[in-house]
Amino acid sequence: MYFCSPIFRQMEKESEFLIPVSGLALGVHNYRFDINDDFFVDLDYSEVKHGRVTVDLEVLREELMMTLNFHLEGEVLVPCDRCADEFYIPIQSEQVFYIKLGAEGVEESEDVAVVPAEEHAYDVRSLVYEYIILAIPIHRVHPEGECNPEVLALLSHDEEPVEEEGVETDPRWAALKDAKIEDN
């Protein structure tokens, strides 16, 4: 019977995102990562907890540099900005990251890292997470007609505000009461 300890499973998950550096032959190499809920759950700080994303990674290994071309496509569960109900929003992204092989193990910029040429592997897990988060649109709203109707009814309720007895209403607010806002 095959037994796999939790520690071994965690190491296996982490090694899934290791791209060889020193032993990688010159030329193009392709990798595929199928991201699911386990990926997000393992990241305590993740704002996304559920999703299905396919990451195709093309690595061009040259003498002193590696070019990593990421293509992401899938969907993640996010709250709607309008009604706050969660829904799956499609994401798609193309990103490029460069690894320069040199003496220092520093990040040169947000798109370039310098790693020692004798480094065995480079972990792309954090890049995959970052690129997924960057692919999520800033405005996260259900497609037309799919928002929670109860919440929308509460938001569009046109009741007059209740004025407390003995409290004066600021005249600036009174002037705005009849103003109409038009959607473009």
Image: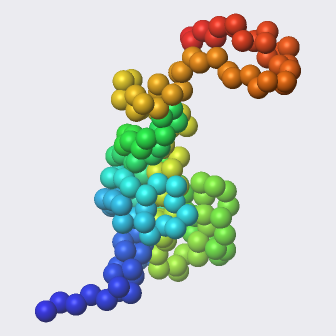
Q: Residue at 38% of width from left, 42% of height from top?
A: 87
Residue 20 in percent (x, y) is at 42, 73
Of residue 85 and residue 159, the one placed in the foreground of this image is 159
Q: Is residue 39 left or right of residue 109?
A: left
Q: Quadrant of residue 179?
A: top right
Please name whichever residue, 109 or 78, is drawn nearer the observer in this view of the structure: 78
Residue under the point 36% across and 53% down = 51
Total labels drawn: 0
Residue 154: x and y in percent read 51, 28
Give the percent coordinates (x, y) of residue 152: 47, 27
Coloration mode? rainbow
- Could one spot residue 171 in this view of the protein? yes
* Left or right: 178, with 10 as reference point: right
- Residue 119's place in the image compared with 151, above or below, is below
Quadrant into which the N terminus falls: bottom left
Residue 66 position (above or below residue 24): above
Q: Is residue 133 above or below residue 151?
A: below
Please identify the quadrant where the C terminus is shown.
top right
Residue at figure coordinates x 43%, y 62% from the top left: 40
Residue displayed at 39% across by 23% down:
144
Question: Toward the viewer: 75 or 81?
Answer: 81
Regarding residue 26, the answer to whether it shows in the image is no
- 63 or 34: which is nearer to us? 34
Q: Position of residue 30 (x, y in %)?
A: 32, 59
Q: Quadrant of residue 108?
A: bottom right
Q: Residue furthest left?
A: 1
* Residue farthest toward the front in the current orientation of the protein: 165
